[in-house]
């Protein structure tokens, strides 16, 4: 779950909806970034489905007693998280091996920064998967096409997270991970600087899309009073879905 706090409520966005937004962003990329080659549809599938493992976890949100807020993707315990990550990539693999390889590489790229025993065990499992899939696909792990699409997947994931994890229009300096910008979809390029023009329009210093796009995603506004009365899961389930539209454009 992606969660941020406001005075009287929590805004909550499921990881799978964030992934669907990643897929929409991937589909809108200009052809100079995502060419019409034989792996483009595999990449689009990976972008849209990379967080399938969160579907069950997000169906019944849990309360973090220590921080007095719902658990989010930032602080959810690692052990159950890894179990469901594995399940999600297994489901992708049943439908598309190249997409599963991209999803696995995305997760290992993110968790290689951590050094806990739980992470090391998970990484070992996914490295084994990557070797198996690379053999089945008859490609090298350093394949340039694979690395290119992984870079695009990381960019779409980051931009989607940026759109979801704070109130639109918030100072960029308060974004965890992204205060210094987003990773570029072009290999070995500088960060993409992001700035809010207003609460409905985001401006990118490097614009990788075919034209201005409208990013659309659902969210829930869960009142703190309802959480106190019903508990986090029931309050979340009873809250109505709302829709957010954000325009993304070039400087």
Image (tube, rainbow, N blue to C red):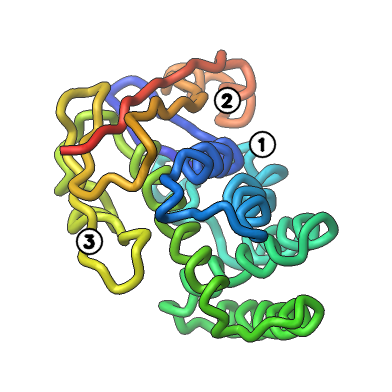
Residue drawn where x is 43% and y is 38% of the image: 3
Q: Percent position (x, y) of residue 200?
A: 27, 22
Q: Which residue is mark 1?
A: 60
Percent coordinates x, y for residue 30 in the rendering:
41, 45
Instruction: State the CA–CA distance, disc 3 to disc 2.
Output: 36 Å
- Depth check, mark 1 against mark 3: the one in front is 3
**Image side of residue 246 versus residue 195, left or right:** right
**Residue at the image position 72 percent from the left and 44 percent from the top:** 56
**Residue count near mark 3 (Cα–Cα under 10 Å), binned few <14, some 14–19, many ≥20:** some
**Observer-nearest residue: 97 or 60?**
97
The residue under the point 50% across, 57% down is 153
Question: In the picture shown, does residue 42 fall above or below 232?
Answer: below
Q: Position of residue 16 (x, y in %)?
A: 61, 41
In the picture of the structure, the residue carrying the numbered disc 3 is 191
The residue carrying mark 2 is: 236
Give the spatial CA distance, label 1 vs label 3.
Answer: 36 Å
Determine the image quadrant of residue 130.
bottom right
Q: Is residue 18 above or below residue 45?
A: above
């Amino acid at each position: 779950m992606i969660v941020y706090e406001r005075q009287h409520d929590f805004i909550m966005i499921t990881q799978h909806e964030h992934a669907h937004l990643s897929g929409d962003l991937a589909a809108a990329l200009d052809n100079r970034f995502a060419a019409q080659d034989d792996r483009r549809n595999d990449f689009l599938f990976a972008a849209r489905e990379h967080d399938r493992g969160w579907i069950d976890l997000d169906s019944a949100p849990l309360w973090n007693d220590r921080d007095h807020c719902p658990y989010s993707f930032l602080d959810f315990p690692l052990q159950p998280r890894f179990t469901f990550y594995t399940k999600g990539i297994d489901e992708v693999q049943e439908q598309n091996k190249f997409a599963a390889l991209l999803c696995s590489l995305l997760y290992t790229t993110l968790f290689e920064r951590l050094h806990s025993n739980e992470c090391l065990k998970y990484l070992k499992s996914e490295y084994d998967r990557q070797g198996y899939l690379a053999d089945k696909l008859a490609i090298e792990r350093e394949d340039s096409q694979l690395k290119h699409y992984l870079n695009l997947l990381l960019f779409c994931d980051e931009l989607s997270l940026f759109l979801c994890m704070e109130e639109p229009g918030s100072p960029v300096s308060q974004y965890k991970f992204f205060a210094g910008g987003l990773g570029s979809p072009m290999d070995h390029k500088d960060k993409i600087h992001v700035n809010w023009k207003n609460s409905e329009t985001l401006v990118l210093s490097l614009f990788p899309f075919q034209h201005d796009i409208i990013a659309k995603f659902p969210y829930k506004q869960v009142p703190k009073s309802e959480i106190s009365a019903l508990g986090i899961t029931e309050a979340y389930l009873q809250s109505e879905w709302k829709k957010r539209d954000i325009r993304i454009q070039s400087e």
